[in-house]
Image (cartoon, helix red, strand yellow):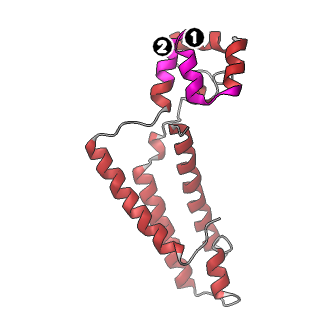
Amino acid sequence: MTTVFKLSDKVAAFKAKLELWGRRLNRGILDMFQTLVGIVGETELEHSFCQLVHDHLSLLLKEFERYFPTTKDPRTGKEWIRDPFVNKPGGSSMSMQLLEIANDGGLKTTFKTTTLPVFWIKVMAEYPEIATTALKSLLPLIWHSSELNKINHFIFIFGVAVFYFEGMFKYN
């Protein structure tokens, strides 16, 4: 099942790739774009071309940051949801519940054998406060219409960028 954590992990990974690709382009390394390397072969590309690609990657990263700001990462402060047996929440009443969960052998077994949302749904019967908090943070949000418009706009921009690069580059 897709969770906010999984989606955030993927966005963070892609943003990190864009940064890495930009640094590599600055050093003239293009191996992350296998199709482009295959086309140009041994030909040395002009600096202006590399700069154009670098600028495009920078703009793409800027757009990702605008739609998925690092400062609003939904994982921040909520790692206890991902692994309640290792990480601790901030709230005091939840800390007590988490201590009880962390020392429950049956729940530990359930955690190892089910998905994260299913685990928290099973915790709900005995620890409704902490399970509700976890599930609200974990499951994808229902967007307001203005948020949906922003997301649709971003998907369009991203789609255009992918279409543009698809003919030139093979993503690793």
Q: Which mark is residue 97?
A: 1
Q: Main secondary structure of the magenta part?
A: helix
Q: Amino acid at mark 2?
A: Glu
Q: Which residue in the rendered view is the most extreme toward the left?
A: 145
- Neighbour class for label 1 at 10 Å: few (<14), some, many (≥20)? some
Labelled disc at residue 2: none
Q: Residue at x 47, y 19 (%)?
A: 132
Tell me where residue 78 sits by quadrant. top right
Q: Is residue 50 left or right of residue 161?
A: right
Q: Is residue 122 magenta?
A: yes
Badge 2: residue crowd in 10 Å (few <14, some 14–19, many ≥20): some
Q: Could you say which is closer to the camera, residue 89 or residue 155?
A: 155
Q: Position of residue 8 (x, y in %)?
A: 53, 44
**25 or 126: nearer the eye?**
126
Q: Is residue 83 left or right of residue 145?
A: right
Q: Residue 129 got which mark?
A: 2
Q: Position of residue 122 (x, y in %)?
A: 57, 18
Dot 2: what SS?
helix
> At which x and y percent is residue 164?
47, 74
User: Mark 2 to mark 1: distance in Å?
Assistant: 9 Å
Instruction: State yes or no: discs 2 and 1 in contact (Cβ < 8 Å).
Output: yes
Q: Which residues are magenta?
A: 113-134
